[in-house]
Image (tube, rainbow, N blue to C red):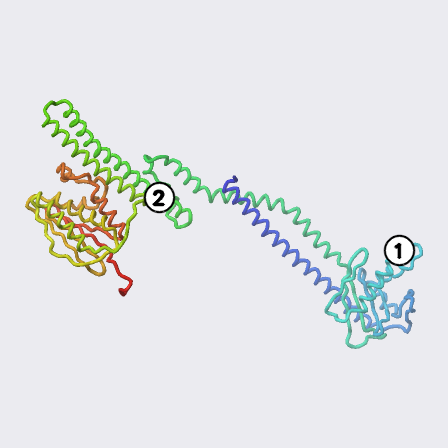
Amino acid sequence: MASVRSRITVAYSVATIISLSVLAVLFGVERYVGVEQDLAERTTRTAALAARVIERQGVQGVTLDTAYAAGNMFNLGVTRVLDELNGYYIVVADSTGRILYWSEPVRRIYYRGYDETLPPAQRALYRIEFDSIRNAALGIVNAATPRRVQLSTEQVLMTAHLPGQPLPGGVRRIVVGISTQRLRDVVSESISLAVLASPVLLGLSIGVAWMLSGRVLEPIDRMVDDVAAITDGRSLHRRVVLESETTDELGRLGQTVNDMIARLETSFSSLRRFTADASHELRTPLTVIRADVERAMSVEDQYEKAVALEEALQQVSRMTGLVESLLTLARSDEGRFDIIREPVPLEPLFREVVETATILGEDAGITVTLPVIQPVTVSADAERLRQLFLNLATNAIKYTPRGGMIELSLETRHDEAIVTVRDNGIGIAAADLPFIFDRFWRVDTVRSRSEGSGVGLGLAICQWIAQAHNGRIDVTSRLGRGSTFTVVLPAHRSKGENS
């Protein structure tokens, strides 16, 4: 396939040739019309000149016979002056159509028609040409409209001078014709010029198009080289070099490519971090399971075997939860996780979550309260919402010291359902707040809590569930003073309710 530069060159050259061809045609037509008007004006001026000569010189009393013999009725002075107008086909006639004078080119055609030395066919052709000239001359009724007469060797453009008052001798019609050879010459010159100039113009247009397209595509070539140099995830820190901070198409293309590379860099970094964290989280329970199984196989005491197997079972349960969480997030990333939406009254669902949180809190020595609960309905997947609220409550219990307090509330405000989970636990530092929804993210103080700390996927799943329901999660926290998680979901509106 031809390169973009070649296609641009061909397109530019074709457009240039077409444009020049159109201009050449327009120029040729304009020149043709100009020459035609000039010929018509020359015949008109010549006819007017002949009229003034006849008017001043007068005529004799001699007339031509019906055979148009030699001589004419004009005096010698008039004849000599009119004969000096070489190259013009001049016919002078009176009001009856009788020809009083013809110029030398017309006489030559007439006499050749009766020249016995010429073949009969050629004589007949000359007589036909003479009749054509005579009929055209006598048939012009509008002095402003020229007529064309086609002869065997050329075409004649004829214009009439029709004086308002008869001139001496009864002259009422002076017709002057001129050869249109100049018009044919114009056409021939235009064609010759086009034939001679076309190769030069074509070569010049190709050269200019190739040079200009090269300059236009040069930034794109450099951009291609820059992108080609970014071959894998380790090169994503590089960016396409922009010529300048412009807003043209190339500048926007470069900026778009840089933005895409930045997103890819973030995605690759997240993927590497995700893989490393997942490997770390899976390696620990696998190591514990292996150690417990080896211990169970090596000891004879049944009680110690049972303890070892119980610890291994706990690690298997932990791995199962981790794998299920990873599978949930993977499916959500691919958009393959179906959310079944239906009107869900939140009050009973939320009371179930509070009851479960109260039981979990009693084991941890934490008080769970429900100060506010208001009826509200949302369009959602009930199981996913239960998972969302329970995750937040469980997370609050994990990071609240014994003797602490957790407050859960459900209220409605401005067509929104507001679920708040507030604790007075260890809190989160301001510097860590932007990262708490990242997968496998846990601050050092949280990591130290070993078993109860989880694997760092709960909040990521919570955020996904909220966003899948067109909602959001807001969080405020101060280190050592507790945290507040607020889930905002759009309330369900029945068809009968006003907007």
What is the x, y in percent for residue 269?
28, 38
> 55 or 172: nearer the eye?
172
Q: Image quarter for residue 437?
A: top left
Disc 1 target residue:
121
User: Which quadrant of the structure image shows residue 118?
Assistant: bottom right
What is the number of the mark on residue 476? Answer: none
* Above or below 133: residue 230: above
Residue placed most toward the observer, 54 or 330: 330
Q: Residues within 10 Å of mark 2 (few under 14, many from 20)?
A: few
Residues at marks 1 and 2, CA–CA distance in whole angstroms: 88 Å
Q: Is disc 1 placed on a helix, strand or loop?
A: helix
Q: Which amino acid, mark 1?
A: Ala
- Residue 487 position, x and y percent, is 20, 52
**Mark 1 crowdedness (10 Å alpha carbons): few <14, some 14-19, many ≥20:** few
Residue furthest to the right in view is 116
Residue at the image point whose x is 83% and y is 69% from the top: 92
Residue for badge 2: 260
Relative vertical location of residue 45 with respect to residue 182 in this rendering, above or below = below
Image spot of residue 242 (x, y percent) = 38, 43
Which quadrant of the figure contains the C terminus? bottom left
Label 2 element class? helix
Comparing marks 1 and 2, which lies closer to the viewer? 2
